[in-house]
Amino acid sequence: MLQTSNSTTHSSIFLSSSPIQQFSNTPSSFTNENSPIRSRLQQHQHQSIVTMSFSTASSFSNPRSLHFFSNSVNGRGKPVSFGFRVRAGSADVPDFLSADWLESGGKRPLGPRLEFSAEDAVRHQLDALKYNDQPRADYGIEVMYRFAGFDPFERSTYFGPFFDLGQFERFRRIFHHSHYRVLLGHKDRKLLSSLWVKENRFKQRLWVQGNRPEEEEIFEFTMVQRLGGSWDGYWLTESLLHDGDSFSGGVAY
């Protein structure tokens, strides 16, 4: 039986067979009949378990010296060390995450808070979009998704037309592949108007200047304060509409 593990710093290989057969491919100095090691192993007439333990990095780029410990069934065994070396090809581990992912991911993205007013909720969302890629890519869109008040199991009119926004990736793509990209890293914005439709319903229209030449758009936030349930008292975004026909040519999302 051969069992290997190379995913951690300490790896072990277990071999189970007769003591002599286990080392049939070792140097002749070890298998010589007059070898003291061979004589010691021949005293065992039962199965032995030999554990080969070594320390290594995640990629085996250099040969390592191995130390064997012969543990007999009756518990009496002595360590045996010799210069048997193993060379394994290096295997690079792909870096799927940025170097600062753990540090940046430790902070939960900003989301609705009970102390936020309707105006505060809009302002925090716009600030997050202005610095969209800080502290990581599309952090600002994550903040928008946390404030979104739609049901992820139902098609939503958050952007106007009915869209299935239950997956964050679809929500994110609309910001990158439509007029909404103006909001990402925008240079400036101005409040055009505010309207309290009801005590728990608020609308705000804003002019936004993008970071590309002659890029400017107008958007309308509709905020709703939830009544009852776990979000009681929180202001969530019911819709974020572009002042125009943003999806006349369709959108891939």
Image (cartoon, helix red, strand yellow):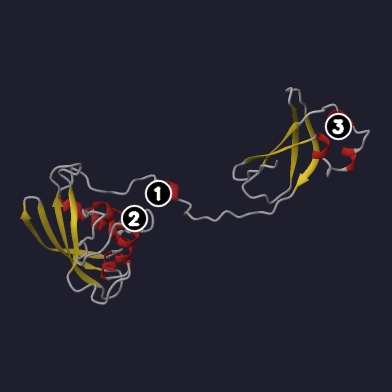
Q: Say left or right for 173 vs 223.
A: right
Sequence-wise, which precedes: disc 2 or disc 3?
3
Circle 3 sits on which residue? 37
What percent of the width, then of the height, locates residue 189? 21, 64
Q: Amino acid at mark 1?
A: Ser
Identify the residue at horizontal 85%, vertical 26% (top origin).
43
Sequence-wise, which precedes: disc 1 or disc 2?
1
Q: Say left or right for 246 vs 103.
A: left
Q: Say left or right for 57 vs 200.
A: right
Residue lying at the far right in this picture: please name it. Answer: 34
Circle 2 sits on which residue? 139
Numbered label attached to residue 141: none
The vertical placement of 22 against 250, above or below, is above
* Mark 2: secondary structure: helix
What percent of the width, then of the height, locates residue 174? 29, 66
Circle 1 sits on which residue? 104
Marks 1/2 in contact by CB < 8 Å: the verdict is: yes
Q: Looking at the rendering, which quadrant does residue 214 occupy?
A: bottom left
Q: Amino acid at mark 2?
A: Tyr
Q: Amino acid at mark 3?
A: Ile
The vertical placement of 204 against 105, above or below, is below
Q: Spatial distance from mark 2 to mark 3, Cα to Cα? A: 63 Å
Identify the residue at horizontal 48%, vertical 52% (top origin).
99
